[in-house]
Amino acid sequence: MGLAVLVVLATSSPAVSARTTPPDPLAEFHNQTLTWAPCQGDLECASVVVPLDYADPGLDRISLAVSRRKATELRRGVLVANPGGPGGSGLRMPAFLSTTALAKSYDLIGFDPRGVGGSTALTCRAVPEITTTDSRPPDSEFAKWTAEARAAEDACQASAGGIRRFVNTANTARDLDVIREVLGEPRISYLGYSYGTYLGAVYGSLFPYRLDRSVLDSSVHPEWLWRQQAKGQAVATRRNVELWSEWAAEHDDVFGLGRSGPEVLATIERTSARLALDPVGAHTRSEFDAAVGVGSRYRPLWTDLAGVVGGLNGGAGTTPQAAAEQSARFAASAKGELKSGVFTTITCEADWPRDLETYYEDMRVFRDRYPYGFGVLRAAPTACTFRSFTPPGPMVPLKRDGYPVGLVVQAEGDTQTQYEGGPAMASRLGDNLLTVLDEGKHGVYNSGNACVDAVVDHYLVDGVLPPSSSTCPGDPRPDPARPSTRPAGSFLDTAGLAERLAR
């Protein structure tokens, strides 16, 4: 993005009495001066230098790319926003929030976390595919999945240099506090999506007196870091499929897929089994299983999914070929949710099982019970199974002790951070919970939900909390007689947010 920046490290610090105040080990980082330069359209960018290892700050250094959009009206402070990932670039977050009420009251701050984008990047080599992504792999394929995970870890470790073991959530939170200090702010407010909810919780736990108002949107589960979080995605997807099946059964006079939820599920399974033996063109069982996961997640697409299933079964209104094309578009959205790189490194901050049979037992369950949306992939070995580095410290215990009550926003049908994560995080931190009913989106604030936007704005701008547990409606379920007029990709949270951040 061609940032024009200047960083000047201070050569001295204010004199203090050694008898009353110990020296600040991060003084040279806290006292650096930034020169902001235009970037990313209407934003300003700068670079902040931070220690690679906070246990030895005088040794190696890395840089962070930081962006800013100043408040347009009466300023109450700064708000840092993180899009999640882990591994998501946050430089465009101020632009993403520029049309919200937050832009009037806050200097909006974004940044690329360590290892990402314009910051000192963690680069992992790609490895050739050893196996294909099969939604229901036989046992004989498990070893290939394992070999690919091991190869991914070996390739990343070989190309990640000396920074990989220091790319973790705790150090990213420490980086955030250096940014706060360099900005000259006694406290920051915070908005985090997805993994960004965990980053915010860790920051508040490490620096409780530096955090002001906080919103955690689409929260991870504080007890599921990180393998159980992945497995929960498959469980949430199955839940949406069952809800869609019940809805389709209520409109059997329109769709003809079954008169009860189990009958509709049986229709899905027959379709999947037939595609395994006789694909429609290039459309396979695995693509269909993935499409069912995506189509059931977003309520406005429910009629479209019914058309796909009906069309592949010779129903009126479309051809198997046209249904297969629509199904393939859904499946492409599901594949777009698969992550790597910094995502893998940070999720390896937690210990994963080393016993391969633990994974294989889960894969047998998940391919049968949770095949939709590539559910079996959530149970398979990953690079973290073969982690070749030792994290520099333990995971940070999460607590809220010293900063104000915050707000957790969670959608009932979210498949990337299962709904249970929201209540669990709210309970752990003693935050208030806003549930978005019958909604599959991941990242709800500033996504078109007026109720959620109003609640979040009233809290972050005016300081008024909603009730301890409250609700907003999600996108309405569709008219069964009308297909959606919006493409599947427009509902995909990660793609939609990424597109808006790229503008």
Image (cartoon, rainbow, N blue to C red):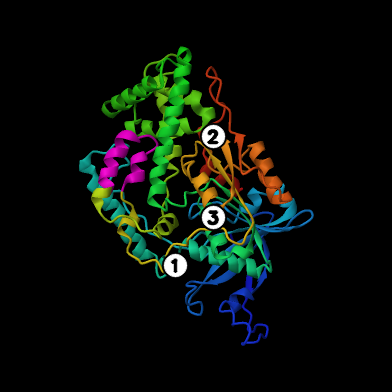
| Kind of element beneath mark 1 | helix
How many residues crowd around disc 1 within 10 Å: few (fewer than 14), some, or many (20 or more)? many
Dots 1, 2 in contact, CB < 8 A: no
Stretch of the chain drawn in magenta? 359-380
Dot 2: what SS?
A: loop
Mark 2 neighbour density, 10 Å: few (under 14) some (14–19) many (20 or more): many
Q: Is residue 26 left or right of residue 263?
A: right
Residue 393: quadrant of the picture = bottom left
Q: Are marks 3 and 1 in contact (CB under 8 Å)?
A: no
> Mark 3 vs mark 1: which is more N-terminal?
3
| Residue 422 lies in the magenta-colored region | no
Q: Is residue 342 above or below residue 300?
A: below
Nearest to N terminus: mark 1 or mark 2: 1
Residue at label 1? 166
Judged left or right of residue 272, residue 411 is: right
Give the distance between the C-alpha atoms of the residues marked 3 and 2, in whole angstroms. Answer: 25 Å
Mark 2: which amino acid?
A: Glu
Q: Which mark is residue 10?
A: none
Q: Which residue is disc 2 drawn over?
A: 439
Towards the viewer: 175 or 487: 175
Nearest to the eye among marks 3 and 1: give it.
1
Q: Quadrant of the N terminus?
A: bottom right
The residue at which mark 3 appears reads as 89
Amino acid found under the numbered disc labelled 3: Ser
Q: Percent x, y for residue 468?
A: 62, 44
